[in-house]
Image (spheres, rainbow, N blue to C red):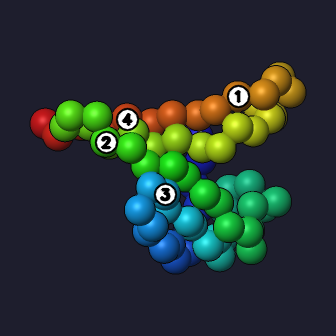
Amino acid sequence: MFAYVGTYVVESDRVIHILDGSWNELWTGTRQVRFLAFRGDRLIYTTPETVDPMDGKRCTYEVTFSRG
């Protein structure tokens, strides 16, 4: 689960979230970048490489949105 609130800026291949509040208090006041890509009728929303807080391994998270 993840949740945050704030404003955002959309650039050609990314969205930058400027966080006013977050479930993860370490993110509050930060900028979170998410990369955007389109594949057919799908929007792929991807994080930069990061460390998974559960196991400490390097990973990338990806969310896919599709038109129904």
Q: Amino acid at mark 4?
A: Thr
Q: Is residue 54 visible?
A: no
| Mark 3 → mark 4, Cα distance in angstroms | 14 Å
For marks 1 and 3, the one nearer the N-term is 3
Looking at the rendered image, the quarter that the N terminus falls into is: top right
Q: Is residue 51 left or right of residue 63?
A: right
Residue at x 57%, y 67% (from the top left corner):
17
Q: Which mark is residue 64?
A: 4
Image coordinates for residue 38, horizontal then vertical, percent: 31, 42
| Mark 2 → mark 4, Cα distance in angstroms | 10 Å
Q: Which residue is more in the foreground, 8 or 1? A: 8
Question: In the displayed image of the protein, which residue is found farthest to the right?
Answer: 56
Locate residue 26: give its quadrant.
Answer: bottom right
Q: Amino acid at mark 3?
A: Arg
Disc 3 is placed on an element classified as strand
For marks 2 and 3, the one nearer the N-term is 3
Q: Which mark is residue 14?
A: 3
Q: Amino acid at mark 1?
A: Cys
Q: Which mark is residue 59?
A: 1
Q: Is residue 47 left or right of residue 51?
A: left
| Mark 4 → mark 1, Cα distance in angstroms | 16 Å
For marks 3 and 4, the one nearer the N-term is 3
The answer to the question of whether label 2 and label 4 lie on touching residues, with beta carbons closer than 8 A, is: no
Image coordinates for residue 4, horizontal then vertical, percent: 59, 61
Q: Which mark is residue 38?
A: 2
Residue at x 21%, y 34% (from the top left corner):
40
Mark 2, other Cα within 10 Å: few <14 / some 14–19 / many ≥20: few
Q: Is residue 56 left or right of residue 38?
A: right
| Mark 1 → mark 3, Cα distance in angstroms | 18 Å
| Mark 2 → mark 3, Cα distance in angstroms | 11 Å
